[in-house]
Image: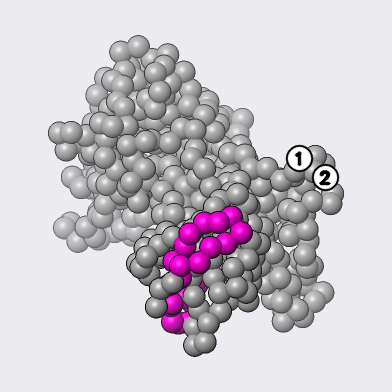
Amino acid sequence: MCRVQSDRASVRRRTVSVPATAFERLHHSSLVTLPPLRRRLGRRCCGVFGWHNPVGNHHPIALRRAFGGYQLATRCSTMAEVQQAAPRRRLSGMDLLHDSAVVRLTHDDVNYEIILLKNKSVADCRENQALTSASTWSDDLPQEQNLANHLVRYRACRQLALDAVGLWAKPGKWEYTSWLQQPLYWEGAPRKQQLFTEGKELVAIPAETHPSSCLSPVPNVYDGVRVYTPDELTAVAVVCRHMFKVTDADGKAMLLKQVYHYEEAGQFTREIEVLRDLQPHSAIVGMCGVVSPSAGLIDGILLPFLSGRTLNTVESATKAQVEQWKEHIGAAIDYLHSQGKVWGDAKHANVMIDDEGRAILFDFDGRTTEGFVDQDNAMSVIGDKQGSAAIYEFLDGLSAQPPGAAAAPGDAA
């Protein structure tokens, strides 16, 4: 059945009858169950509920109750058009802590992370109300009460994120335009927005889940380094946050590490400084170029994509393999030092054993790892020697096995 009606805004609309089960499926796919439907559809009523208007994001659907189901007052002529017009929103998870929350959801096929932090400047604000809507986890409370409190806080944070969709559902400044239709892009680089109250107004600003993570590209001051644009690259796999396996027009596989992956911009630029003018070395990862999202700026470094496994995942090796890997690692470190450079974060997790059995050093961002390099020896020749000694000790502790029995390495980067 279809009939034409008009609302207070004199908008001519069709009414499409929809079975209850179909409408429930439509709304469950948008994170909304039937009881809070009025909040979802807004205030301009048509029948029992009204025109969908969440925080200024107009949508051509209204609802009225009918016998045996629901009626959608809509500009769409078929249910397929209704489902296509409806906002596609799906909650994928939440990290809920004592004074913070990260709501992960998909909205219109784009992954978002909405961050809520305790606001110390404005005590009575929506983010604080959501985070303190119930008591946080306490050993003094029964587990059932803790779970109930956690659920209350979870729902309050989720609802705040959904209510503010008009604030955070917007493109990021440095997104790769040519990658926007690639689902892999959003898997590895979701849009991140923080909701907080400024004065009396709730606003959304770009943010990182790690508070010290980089948010912007850096100037390109590296003459002679090959510069790629995002249009020249295709993402083929997500390695981890802001790290992608990509290919160029010739099918060459590379690893893209974006500046947003690092805790600070200095780590990103240091890796470029170390690798940019090194001569090719069989035991050191090379550098293929940088990625420029805008003229004069770079936000990615391109490295060869290494297929193999990191040394820290190796459980057994022959004596010959151990000696060979020690030789590769020692030769690479000696070469770095001869060029006035250091490895920095010398540890077994930063050594790749490739498919040909070679040990290759990677990760030159300057961080150090406890148990391998003391903080007092960070970014020094002494630190590299200390870290390599710990690696050799790990190698000596591997269980022996006969030649040819080593497990086949899988793809890694």
SS under mark 2: loop
Q: How many marks?
A: 2
Amino acid type assigned to the residue bearing label 2 in the image: Val
Quadrant of the frame with the N terminus: bottom left
Q: Quadrant of residue 249?
A: top left
Colour convention: one colour
Residue 159 can be seen, yes or no: no
Binning the other alpha carbons within 10 Å of mark 2 as few (below 14), some (14 to 19) or many (20 upward) gives some
**Residue at horizontal 31 percent and vertical 58 percent from the top:** 316
Residue 191 pos. (x, y %): 50, 45
**Residue at horizontal 33 percent and vertical 46 percent from the top:** 181
Does residue 152 belong to the magenta stretch? Answer: no
Does residue 11 belong to the magenta stretch? Answer: yes
SS under mark 1: strand
**Residue at which label 1 appears:** 198
Q: Residue furthest right?
A: 123
**Residue at horizontal 16 percent and vertical 38 percent from the top:** 251
Q: Quadrant of residue 155?
A: bottom right
**Residue at horizontal 33 percent and vertical 55 percent from the top:** 314
